[in-house]
Amino acid sequence: MNRTIKRWTLSQRPDATPTTDCFELVDFELPPLEANQVRIKTHYFSVDPGMRGRLSGDSYAAALPLGAVIESAGIGEIIETSSERFVVGDMVMGGLGWSQGVVQIDRGLQKLDPALFDDKVRITASIGVMGVPGLTAWFGLQDLGRPKQGETLLVSSAAGPVGATAGQIGKSLGLKVVGIAGGTEKCAYVDSLGFDAVIDYKAQKTQSQLIQAIQGACPDGVDIYFDNVGADMLDAAISAMRPHGRIVVSGQIAEYNRPDPHGIRNVTNFITHRLNMAGLVVYDYAKQFPEAQAAIAGLIRRDQLIYSEDISNGIDGAPEAFIGLFSGQNHGRRLIRV
Amino acid sequence: MNRTIKRWTLSQRPDATPTTDCFELVDFELPPLEANQVRIKTHYFSVDPGMRGRLSGDSYAAALPLGAVIESAGIGEIIETSSERFVVGDMVMGGLGWSQGVVQIDRGLQKLDPALFDDKVRITASIGVMGVPGLTAWFGLQDLGRPKQGETLLVSSAAGPVGATAGQIGKSLGLKVVGIAGGTEKCAYVDSLGFDAVIDYKAQKTQSQLIQAIQGACPDGVDIYFDNVGADMLDAAISAMRPHGRIVVSGQIAEYNRPDPHGIRNVTNFITHRLNMAGLVVYDYAKQFPEAQAAIAGLIRRDQLIYSEDISNGIDGAPEAFIGLFSGQNHGRRLIRV
């Protein structure tokens, strides 16, 4: 039984946008199983912008140690087991890393029921629209956004896996939904998801043009802003918020590669407009995941939620796929098929 | 009956810190009463930093028209009435302006029950610790701060009328309370109010010293930050917040005199620390005012709440008293005895 696998490790910390020389593909021999362990063959793993902060060891997130495997969600198959929880052939979802395989204890893995998946709700959805990105959209919008029918929801990175899901959940709840995305191709994709309007931020040359575009698309103002970007886009949205508006801080991709944070300017609006801004870490809702996943699967089966996956073949290309996230190449969830 | 009174009007809009030539003291003849009106002789009025935004006509607040009387809370005596609601001699509280008197309709005035007031709960408290500043502290802390016994509350402008009240309400709820104020005199005042610790921000030469001072005074982190200042002080507090911390945006005095807003940088902390930031306008809670005022009076009578008033004699000095707010001269609520 060949126990040697390839995996990507962190070889140096990025200063700004990560480069390929921050990563090293190494051969690793998986150890023999101890008690209550499993050996997993990875089928898919994800590349996520949220990993960026942990690569550089910013003070606000636990730094990934140099030499450690890059972490990510993955889907794999149990190929050896000393655990009563799993049998060979079980499909599981968990933090498998940028790796062809792993030996680990039998905890922290979710067994995937093959009966749940089909051509519509694909198994890859378990680390996408039914995994961290989809659950972030679900709990961010439902718990922090506190949506009421007829309100206006504005979503940034609306072509991304979180934003696209948040907007469609918003439509299913009877909201007016406006997306922001970059470029005609992404805007066409957002439009195809049933958003009421789409703003191409790349077509807005100045901050005041961006504000005007938001105000034009949201003439009654914005009740909920679901933010995946931060910085100037967050500031523009704040200036278009209605009284008692809610801002969900889901992601801040415009901040992650800056040496110094940019932040926002319009804080006095929080008083004059009674705004509320809150951030979330989706794992805080872990006990409610199964319920939310069932609800998301229901939306997919009723054609109320379209999801898109951007799947590359082969572990070798993972760093390029990750780096491309920061130049806005992708739409949909970016996955590697190992 | 002499109907000519003096009152302060807005003669030009300030660019940065207001100057005395923004204000003009004019003689005005009060009109005869129409139906359901009252003539009020003003005894006291307040000068409030929150008026600043309306003087310059910033986009986020309704601008006061040029030539209009400067608005403020006041306490006065009914000296003529065509209303069934009031008799001559009644004391009332309302928006009387920087003026010796006013003729107005009999709405928007709260009759003050003399039995409620004595040497401890003075009538001036009705536009101070039991008026807008005190109610802002009460509802900001209770509704947006969501305090739980044993938590740490950090308050900026802790020697000011809102901050001093918020901190003492916090103590009455069993919180650990840390204040921030400027200079040894103000810090000694905050200490005398029973705060657990006081930080002199003027003794901190850099932003990182300010952050260290906050972290030193709040070794377990800050659960609630009650902010009256904004900008760099808000950023420093954000960096010391515990997970799930709440930020109450009560005032932003560091922003009001800037040509461009400064804002905050640490927005990614909202995700990593699950922070919540919310602003309030106290009038949204108007229906709950009597209940809160009774609770505040109870704290005063039980010696759990000390309040300080900074009373100047004579309407002539109102602009200087107002301008002095922005150089941090005052502690306690600043009032004019007319």
Image (cartoon, coloured by chain):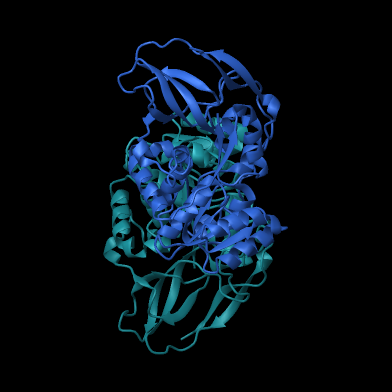
Chain colours: A blue, B cyan
Residue in the picture at 37% in, 27% down: A90
Q: Residue at image x 62%, y 38%?
A: A256
Q: Nearer the viewer, residue B120 or B287?
A: B287
**Image quarter of residue A286:** top left
Q: Is residue A282 left or right of residue B256?
A: left
**Is the residue A114 above or below the residue A141 in the image?**
above
In depth, the one of A147 and A4 nearer the eye is A4
Is A167 positioned to the left or the right of A264 in the image?
Answer: left
Q: Quadrant of residue A118?
A: top left
Image spot of residue A27 (x, y percent):
59, 15
Q: Nearer the viewer, residue A221 or B119?
A: A221
Q: Residue at x 37, y 84 (%)?
A: B81
- Where is residue B277 drawn, in percent x and y? 48, 48
Examine the rendering and report whether any part of residue B283 can be seen.
Answer: yes
**Front-most of residues A99 and A23:** A99
Q: Above or below — where is B71 with respect to B241?
A: below
Q: Position of residue A81 (x, y in %)?
A: 37, 17
Could you say where residue B41 lies in the image, as x and y percent from the top left?
A: 44, 75
Q: Quadrant of the C terminus of chain A?
A: top right
